[in-house]
Image: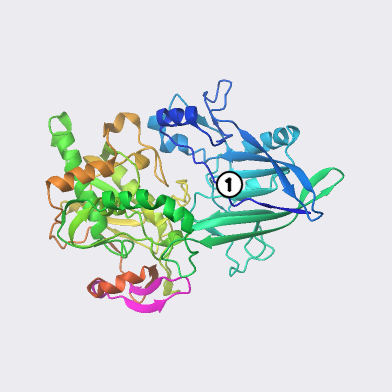
Amino acid sequence: MLEYDAAGLGNHEFNCGLDWLNRTLADATFPLTCANVVTQSRSASPGNFLPPYLLLHRKLRGDDGQMHDLTLGVIGLVPPQIAIWDEAHLSGRLYAQDMVETARAIVPRVRAAGADLVLLLAHTGIDTGAPRPMAENAALALAALPGVDAIMAGHSHDLFPQPACDTAGTSVDHARATLNGTPAFLAGAYGTHLGVMDLALTRRAGRWSVASHHCTLRAVAASSAAATAPDPALSRSLHAAHNLTLRHMRKPIGQSAQRLHSYLALVRPDPSVAAINLLQQRILSCAVADTPYAALPILSATQAFKTGGRGGPQNFTDVPAGPISLRHAADLYPFANRLCGVLITGAGLRDWLERAAICFATQHPDRPEAMLRDTTVPGHDFDVIAGLSYQIDLSAPPRYDRCGALINPASHRIRNLRYSGKPLADTAAFLLATNSHRVQGGGAFQRVDRGAIIHISTPILRDEIVDDIARTPLVLPKDKAAAWQFTNMPGNTVLLDTGPALRSDPDAIADINATDLGITPQGFLRLRVPL
């Protein structure tokens, strides 16, 4: 028997910057694999953009003291939704196929090519719902495929395994670190954890198999109480580059008149969201100033990108009042989206808000103290549209599911939707500032029709935000009128898990009449909030 430590393998995400990637590939000294991204359309004969699998030949010492040859087959997979999220880059150039069907077809090929073990590097999370074609989070279905020995997953920012979770004997078994009986891990996001997978192998009848395994997550973020100490040699090697990066990110770019944090972004109109919406409106207004669309009223839709959840109790935006640096801009807007301007009607705005409101759990009068969030929906799916006022009725079930499918046709959570104090007409015309991820159908949102897109910025939105703040101090309007609020449910309260650092802003807690219930075992600050 011998042990194989797979900690050194990483999940190579597909990069939509094809020109950059092609240059990188020309000089690459490290292997890349991706099986389900092809260079032809669905109707043509596809060709792989990258090698669909790798064969890694290793010599390992066994318990018998002898060296043994082992060939590890590695298959890379990415969510097929990249073709939607990055349509502007990929359309007509690359097409993404179903991960499960791709793996089902290729695993036997990898075995036939000489692989003793097959490992999936799958940029996909765990969805316990029924398997469906072209699924975004397909780790469970992948782990159930014959011939797969282990899977290193990701994408959903989950931590797996978490031994404290009582899931023994289920398809997602934290205690045994298995998905459908297959060894697996998901190592969070943003480098917070290192996944380590030890496989004990045995050879019978000329064939290697996994006899036992041990999968663990090692916390590496400095904010974690269980953080692993940095490697001294690696720290020395990276010291100069690290300090250069810090100096660059601390470069001042402008001023903010108030603190901007997202700790309460899911229970009240949020300053950090309002800041991005204000900036998007300003930028789009300049972009269309000399066009026929300049006369249309401009609204703006954005979300709080950091709302805790799977990212943990430090996963919140918190920008202090005063000087703003590049680091703060990245905190406010962490993704490389582009600003888009789209033509939209009042009916379209209402539907947009219905899709945004699915992140909340349905509340019932006979269950007066339930969790606010639907934990199956990321908080960053909750778009707020600046320029409108409306209420969200949590007693109504969500109209759409996580993937945007209509599940409750008779249900409407959005109430009293108004523009300039008047009920919003379905036929009213607007220009909406939003981001390329939403326009391309990210989250539960519908893909915007090409004909409705009248502007796409060339620079990424974060760079435009930096330039705008440098020109004009960021000062939010003093209008206290609520852009949105929950419909009153007298006697009902909801529970919200947020960041403990909110305690440094007691006025914000008092403004929503919340009660501090203490810190949860996961490190969140739990609030009781009246509806």
Q: Which residues fall within the magenta stretch?
A: 509-531
Q: Position of residue 529 (x, y in %)?
A: 34, 73
In the orientation shown, which residue stands out farthest toward the right?
A: 205
66, 275: nearer the viewer: 66
In the orientation shown, which residue stands out farthest toward the top?
A: 44
468 sits left or right of 306 in the view: left
Q: In the rendered structure, does residue 378 fall within the stretch colored magenta? A: no
503, 418: nearer the viewer: 503
Please state, as top left, top right, bottom left or bottom right, where the N terminus lies in the image: bottom right
- Residue under the image location 47 percent in, 51 percent down: 401
Q: How many marks?
A: 1
Q: In the rendered structure, does residue 518 fall within the stretch colored magenta? A: yes
- Residue 3 visible to the viewer: yes
Would you place residue 313 above or below residue 242 in this image?
below
- Residue 299 visible to the viewer: no
The quarter of the picture where residue 161 lies is: bottom right
Please state, as top left, top right, bottom left or bottom right, where the C terminus lies in the image: bottom left
- Residue under the image location 30 percent in, 53 percent down: 246
| Residue of label 1 | 9
Q: Position of residue 122 (x, y in %)?
A: 57, 44
73 sits left or right of 438 in the view: right
Would you place residue 152 above or below residue 91 in this image?
below
The quarter of the picture where residue 371 lies is: bottom left
Q: Position of residue 28 (x, y in %)?
A: 50, 32
Would you place residue 18 above or below residue 374 in this image?
above
Label 1 sits on a secondary structure element that is loop
